[in-house]
Amino acid sequence: MTTDERVLIELLKDTSLSYISGEALAKALSVSRNSIWKAIEKLKKKGYSITSVRGKGYKIKPGYDVLSKGIIKGDVTIFDSLPSTNDYIKRTDYKDSPQIVIANEQTKGKGRLGRYFFSPKGAGIYMSYSFKPKFIPEDTMLITCGVANVVLDSLLNISGEETKLKWVNDIFLNGKKICGILTEGEFNLENNLFDRIIIGIGINCFPSEVPDDLKDIVGFLSETRKVSYTRNDIISDIINGLDDLFVRKDTLDKDSIVSKYRENCFVVGKTVRLNTFSAEPAQVKILDIGDKCELIVEHLEGIKKGLIENISSGEIIL
């Protein structure tokens, strides 16, 4: 790792945004003061917003959030821009250990059902986590719900915001969607197992210009960039949570995943429109989350009126 990369990591570690002296940086990195000065100048030329004050030292400009491989642990690759992090991973070779790809921007971000996920530059977390599962394919219905639990915990741990889940893969704050999760699998027909699971996570962290058709839907984790945490902090916590959930696990902790998901799913008890793609969306009352994270609903209209049914695929229209 180059000196300028190490200096950047030290500056990003200080969430209080106070100045760090050149002497302190030189001591921490075991290099000369002149090396620190050269590293700072190099970072500035790369476009990093660093304030320098004689007698005080250096600091990253308040509200400036830089994705850093040095802070985020694991097999991480960071890009300034990608069409889609999920699609990028699909073009790479399989690995035994988890692989993480992060982009500062997605130009063709993917949501469920072929939809577009709005991914403006520097305003959110756009990441994919890929791993080779050991558990059987029948457990995969629980994957998205387990990931949602992890993201929910990380957002609370790092930002302090208490978010809620909308079945099956959306995270809401103050009535608006701030996060979507897309789970894709590469299946091996020879052994009836997954070669790889790819989990795409998109989080709207900071306010940005939103297309008119999304203004009533899209929300943000923070309404300002002046926060005490960074995207690096959230990403690192999510990766730790996903590692704990999936790595070296022959089975998933079904009871724990379902219990936590049920507790945080805000649609239980609500009357909504349910689209199962086999007919027109119909009005139902959501009675509960089942033991496989499926919906248990009561139909309120049409030929199924009064029928209680378990729904494992579809989407809720609020």
Image (cartoon, helix red, strand yellow):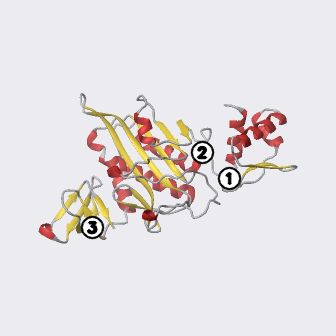
Crowd around label 1: few <14 · some 14–19 · many ≥20 (10 Å)? some
Q: Comparing marks 3 and 1, which lies closer to the viewer?
A: 3
* Comes first in the chain, label 3 or label 1: 1
Q: Are marks 2 and 1 in contact (CB under 8 Å)?
A: no
Residue 302 location (% of width, % of height) = 14, 69
Q: Which residue, given by chain and number where applicable, does mark 3 sit on?
A: 273
Viewport quadrant of the N terminus: top right
Q: What is the secondary structure assignment of the residue under circle 1?
A: loop
Q: Amino acid at mark 3?
A: Arg
Q: What is the secondary structure assignment of the residue under circle 2?
A: loop
Q: Is residue 210 visible?
A: yes
Q: Residue at x 22, y 56 (%)?
A: 277
Q: Residue furthest front?
A: 212
Q: Residue at x 61, y 54 (%)?
A: 229
Q: Residue at x 49, y 54 (%)?
A: 203
Label 2 and label 1: CA atoms lie apart by: 14 Å
Q: Which residue, given by chain and number where applicable, does mark 1 sit on?
A: 15
Q: Comparing marks 2 and 1, which lies closer to the viewer?
A: 2
Q: Residue 172 shows which numbered tag?
A: none
**Residue 165 versus residue 121: which sits nearer the camera?**
121
Q: Amino acid at mark 2?
A: Leu
Q: Residue furthest right?
A: 55
Q: Residue 67 shows which numbered tag?
A: 2
> Left or right of 277: which side holds 49?
right
Q: What is the secondary structure assignment of the residue under circle 3?
A: strand
Q: Is residue 74 visible?
A: no
Q: Name above or below for residue 91 compared with residue 22.
A: above
Say which quarter of the image contains residue 39: top right
**Residue 21 versus residue 43: which sits nearer the camera?**
43
Residue 122 location (% of width, % of height) = 57, 51
**Residue 26 versus residue 84: which sits nearer the camera?**
84
